Image: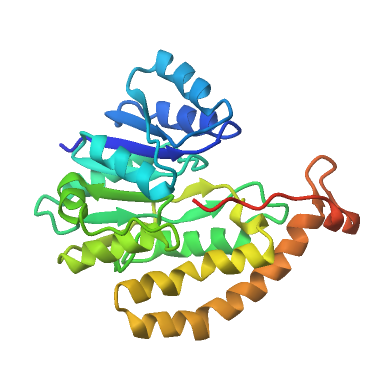
Amino acid sequence: MNTLSVVIPAYNEEQIIGECLRRLAHQREHITEILVVDNNSTDDTRAIVAAHALEWPAIRLIDEAEQGLVHARNRGLDSAHGDLIARIDADTLVPPDWAERILAFFDADQDGYWAAACGRGQAYDLPYGDTVGSLRQRWRTRSKSQVKQVPVLYGSNMILRHDTWAAIRDRVAMRRDIFEDVDTGLCVTEIGGRNAFLPTITVGVAPRRMETGMPSFVRYMVCLPRTLILHRRYGLALGAVVLYLPPIFVVHAARLVLLRTYDAKTRRFDPANLFRKTVDRVAP
């Protein structure tokens, strides 16, 4: 039987970290430890985590002074003791059977065929819902081949074997201008490991990136081809620039209008809300 550690990098997450931990605490039978890595938060993140740790000592609050998601992530992964290390975000809301399904999958893989795994994320609190995501999830769940091999991992919902992390620890990039989860997944494949996609461990993720202004979103998404170029996947990088990113930018522009005009208090759309002051999601 494998043991499961959960690593959560956190920077100013007072609004959601409590709910994230509450959902994990309901699965304490299957989780050995939770490591929240505080990355210089200036709000009440630390106090909220400390309060939850009093109720469940398996929750540990550790610090990482070097600013940046990659530094906080590495601190957490290095400190984890589980055979399996799940890495999620502070705004990730796991379903009730998330940890149990992860353990069942890796316990059944006795030959170690899979080095890592990930599931998808489905945005919550969207004014128009996530119908497309729900249909996609339903199709994947009913598919005869539920588990498939993928080249990259999804940072809000990914799991590494402890041995896998040890093998790629010195290979992962420490840059903040790339997609660290894509980089991690590619590092796994470059050592001969396999990444599994599990459609049955979908988590909820906050739509904060979806609410990012167009210039910031473009700068963020350019991290994808930059990451692929870093790994010399030049064909994939070209494909991302020519075929993938343009429609993504169009979708984001339309989505942004819906999100910006929606008033969560009245639950109505008001064009006047387009002119309200907003704060973009900070770079990890």
| Left-right relation of 171 to 269 | left
Which of the image's four quarters has the N terminus? top left
Pinpoint residue 124: horizontal percent, then vertical percent. Answer: 60, 48
Q: Nearer the viewer, residue 139 or 14?
A: 14
The image quadrant that residue 58 belongs to is top left
Can the viewer see residue 104?
yes
Is 250 drawn above or below residue 178 in the view shown?
A: below
Colouring style: rainbow
Mark yes or no: residue 26 visible: no
Residue in the image at 62% along x and 62% along y: 216
Near-viewer residue (157 or 224): 224
Find residue 107 and report its image quarter. top left
Q: Position of residue 113 (x, y in %)?
A: 14, 59
| Residue displayed at 16% across by 65% down | 191
Q: Which residue is situated farthest in the top direction here?
A: 54
Residue at x 41% of width, y 19% of height: 53
Does residue 40 appear to the left or right of 267 in the view shown? left
Where residue 37 sits: x, y (%)? 39, 34
Q: Nearer the viewer, residue 180 or 164?
A: 180
Question: Left or right of 216: which side holds 203?
Answer: left
**Is 239 rendered above or below residue 214?**
below
x 53%, y 53%: residue: 283
Where 59 sits versus 263, above or below? above
Q: 112 or 247: nearer the eye?
A: 247
